[in-house]
Image (spheres, helix red, strand yellow):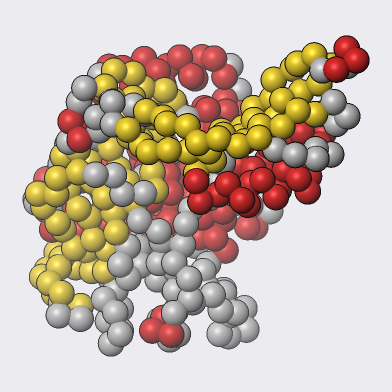
Amino acid sequence: MRIAFIQPIGGASGDMMLGALTDLGMPIEHLEDQLGKLNVGGYRLEARQETRCEMRGTYLKVDLEDQTRYSPKQLLETVEGSSLSDAVKSQSSQVLKALWEAECRVHGETQDILELEELGSVDTLVDVVGSAIGFGYLEVAGIHAAPLVIGNAMPPRWVGGYSNPAPATLELIASAGAPVIGDKPMYEEAGELTTPTGAALITTLAAFGRPAFAVDRVGLGLGTKDPAGFPNALRVWLGETDLAEADSSAQQGQVVLLETNLDDVSGLVLGYAQERLFAIGALDVWNTPIQMKKNRPGTVLSALVPIDKEREASELILHETPTLGIRTRQVDRYVAGRQIAKVETGFGPISVKIKILDGKAVSAAPEPDEVRQIALETGRPFQEVYQMATEEASRQLL
């Protein structure tokens, strides 16, 4: 399966994403031809080779010749009414909707009255749609990403200015639960490194984490800044996953099973203990009803944890439940290979977990949290969204 891994080594923006995809081999002529299907003018593309901290890459600039500002509805209608492929329209619409929803949360407004400034320009449309075009041209089936580099968190530098990260950027990060790199001295004077558009592209289209895959090409997209301490650049790795590496019968070593019998505990306590155990790294936690001495109904609390978490998990159970003792034993386990990928559906991209046996993908299950979010946003039944995602995953990946 063809995948792309996005590495924001010095930030992320729409221009940087376009530069990286062009650097990977997407011809600028192809990009211009496909963008022409939007039937929107007032801009000019320029791609040139430059360096940042002695790293060569592509700087793609979108020169605006028309400063017209569009509403979210107008931009979405432009995409949906175009003759672009369904996949490009779906990805673009999902990113734009995520961007507008973040702006609405920041300003406390609805999309029908939201007034956009920079994000309402043709530049935003070119960045978002152009990125979807690039991933399609490179035949990318799954997108993954490293933690975001947002620069140092800092207050506004002038009256009426925004803090870093920008409010919409932070809303997108929080909504996706995206990992970010911490503050570093070299970012002190850099200001904004990840823009709302860059954050929207990555948090909407990519799953965080780098899978095992064979890299065959690397593209570098350059930003407008040129700090001395680090390259203002975004790198995209392109390659193929090797499903054979995920052996279905690979032994994963030993884990520890913790168990305790409880007959004087409420469901509220059991639920809280389960949450805490998962939070510290438990692999699985479950409760089993049993009959205890004197015919009292009880519960077996069981937790499967890594060996290095045995003591911490045991102490947590002792603190959070009335138990006086815990049984422990080491057990062997075998696991099937697994990978996370994004599939395109009629509701937009959805993450799916792929099960691999003997080097072949045998099943794929949608991530329930993403299905739930889409069901809430669209008003469609959970089961309908889940079923469509399952069918698309089977068609595209199996």
In this rendering, does residue 5 appear at all?
A: yes
- Which is nearer the eye, 201 or 242? 242
Please name the residue shown 23% across and 61% down the image. 235
In this view, 87 is above or below 102: above
Please name the residue shown 55% across and 49% down the image. 309
Residue 375 percent across, percent down from the top left: 57, 25
Q: Quadrant of residue 55?
A: bottom left
Residue 285 percent across, percent down from the top left: 62, 32
93 to the left or right of 293: left
Please name the residue shown 46% across and 62% down the image. 180
Outermost residue toward the right in this view: 294
- Which is nearer the eye, 111 or 261? 261
Give the number of callouts. Answer: 0
Q: Quadrant of the N terminus?
A: top left
215 to the left or right of 321: left
Residue 149 percent across, percent down from the top left: 40, 67
Q: Quadrant of residue 44?
A: bottom left
Please name the residue shown 38% across and 43% down the image. 207
Q: Quadrant of the C terminus?
A: top left
247 to the left or right of 385: left
351 to the left or right of 60: right
